Amino acid sequence: MEPQELPDDVLVGRNAVTEALKAGRGINKILLAEGDKEAFASEIMNLAKERKIICQFVERSKIEAIAAGHRHQGVLAYVAPVEYAELEDILKAAEERGEAPFLLLLDELEDPHNLGALLRTADATGVHGVLIPKHRSVPLNATVAKTSAGAIEYVPVARIGNISQTLKALKEKGFWVAGADMDGAQAYNEADLTGALVLVVGSEGRGMSRLTKEACDFIVSMPMVGRINSLNASVAGSILMYESMRQRLARKSGL
């Protein structure tokens, strides 16, 4: 049986995964076959630990199913189509452009199509970078890249650890944090969305977590007159990004 074509975001085999780790390639997660205690597994795990990449032991049959006939040697990695950025580099780039940093933070977003759509809008509205958690969040993958229509090449995406701690650190740098929630006390178009700002959009269905809400400086809502009382995460995020851009352009032109 001939091997099938691998997905764009999958690497298989000891050497391929080891070299990707050494080269600093963006890797979302590594799968290792249970029972493999050979030296190569230790080397891969040590390299992954240095780069804070998740390693997970799974049944060999799971790796075989994903590898689709390719020689995997008990090792498989999900890779990002582009490199992840560092938060500090995103902030530095905004400073070099003489612009107030404008960030979008996604609280455990799960749908790659939503992430791709948000990246596309982020590029259109001048967002300097998008922040996603390392855990319980969709990573950059082939579906995200395709949905973003090329925006993934231009909008830096950084993976962060604890959301509350990241927001606290950003607030200490002078950022304001605005969360989107249907129970928000302020209409989105009445809030000041200029200056150093982090826009926070919650996950599909659940919205922002309690701890993330508590870390926000203010919560904004979007008035609706229809029968459905919530918006798709990518739509809500896009509305907020465009409102922030509108306010920034108005302030820049002195209106």
Image (tube, rainbow, N blue to C red):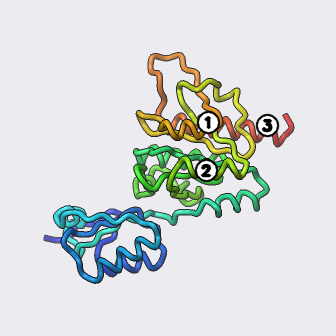
Task: Tell me which numbered mark, 2 or 1, is placed earlier along the sequence.
Answer: 2
Residue 131 rendering spot, x and y as whole percentages: 55, 52
**Residue for badge 3:** 250
Task: Tell me which numbered mark, 3 or 1, is placed earlier along the sequence.
Answer: 1
- Left or right of 146? Residue 97 is right
Indicate the quadrant containing the C terminus: top left, top right, bottom left or bottom right.
top right
Q: What is the spatial separation of the Cα atoms under label 3 and label 1, in whole angstroms?
A: 15 Å
Secondary structure category for the residue under label 3 = helix
Question: Within 10 Å of the Cα at label 2, are there few (<14), some (14-19), or many (20+) other Cα atoms?
Answer: many
Residue located farthest toward the right when viewing the structure as drawn: 254
Give the residue at x 70% y 26%: 190
- Left or right of 203? Residue 65 is left
46, above or below 205, in the image: below
Q: Is there any visible trace of residue 172 in the rendered image?
A: yes
- Left or right of 188? Residue 139 is left
Q: What is the spatial separation of the Cα atoms under label 2 and label 1, in whole angstroms?
A: 14 Å
**Residue for badge 2:** 123
- Depth check, front residue: 199 or 232: 199
Which amino acid, mark 2? Asp
Q: Which mark identifies residue 240?
A: 1
- Whether the residues at callouts 3 and 2 have beta carbons within 8 Å, the answer is no
